[in-house]
Image (cartoon, grey):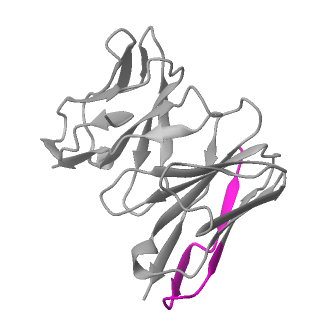
Amino acid sequence: RKEVEQDPGPFNVPEGATVAFNCTYSNSASQSFFWYRQDCRKEPKLLMSVYSSGNEDGRFTAQLNRASQYISLLIRDSKLSDSATYLCVVNRAQAGTALIFGKGTTLSVSS
Amino acid sequence: GAVVSQHPSWVICKSGTSVKIECRSLDFQATTMFWYRQFPKQSLMLMATSNEGSKATYEQGVEKDKFLINHASLTLSTLTVTSAHPEDSSFYICSARSGAQPQHFGDGTRLSIL
């Protein structure tokens, strides 16, 4: 089983739509969780950390369910500029603090 | 904010060439650096974890004799792809962190082997 699994999509939505991405992770000892955004042929950039209580940053809401080992990202009022690949990232509990990346979910927002 | 510089950003070489990629932390001391590789439409795959002054810890399936990692100082780590072949063509990204601080990523190096 992969350490981090995501639905690769693509998700094709119109501007203004609400879209949700899901992710599961296999290591129950993982402590830190993130969503990164990666644009084509670029390095990944941190979008937001994910906390157990759930957290929101503008149009983005992230949630964590430790019992189910499940992470989600909700994007409201999608913009054209939201088009990118969204990477679910989990900190590996053992072996230092390496970040383990999911394959990513591709989002395409159209006008 | 913290900056990680990676060089070169793009390299094209003939098969059999060895290629060195540098990763520098510009405004902080990186006690740990990580090297990732990303093939098209794939996730970033961790290749190795490197602590300053120690031998790198390689992920399963990554050949340590093929991908030489040197982390001789707190601001520089290098990845050398030895005798590169077309199947080594990929996007290589480093990241660096200081202690328990968040990781910061370099811009990546796109390696194309002809």
Residue B23 appears in the rendering: yes
Q: Quadrant of residue A72?
A: top left
- Compared to residue B62, the image places residue A50 above or below, namely above
Residue B106 lies left or right of residue B44; in this view the side is: right
- Tell me which segment is drawn in magenta: B1-20
Q: Quadrant of residue A93?
A: top right
Q: Decide whether residue B10 is among the magenta residues.
A: yes
Q: Nearer the viewer, residue A60 or A105?
A: A105
Residue B89 appears in the rendering: no
Q: Position of residue B3 (x, y in %)?
A: 70, 51
Residue sitting at x 49%, y 72%:
B110
Residue B31 lies left or right of residue A68; in this view the side is: right
Residue sitting at x 33%, y 45%:
A103
Q: Decide whether residue A3 is among the magenta residues.
A: no
Q: Nearer the viewer, residue B59 or A88?
A: B59
Q: Nearer the viewer, residue A39 or B33?
A: B33
Q: Quadrant of the N terminus of chain B?
A: top right
Residue sitting at x 61%, y 61%:
B64
- Compared to residue B79, the image places residue A102 above or below, namely above
- Counting every numbered tag in the picture gives 0
Q: Nearer the viewer, residue B25 or B53?
A: B53
Q: Position of residue B28 (x, y in %)?
A: 81, 46
Q: Position of residue B60 (x, y in %)?
A: 50, 49
- Compared to residue A40, the image places residue B84 above or below, namely below
Q: Quadrant of the C terminus of chain B?
A: bottom left
Q: Residue furthest bottom?
A: B14
Q: Position of residue A92 (x, y in %)?
A: 53, 31
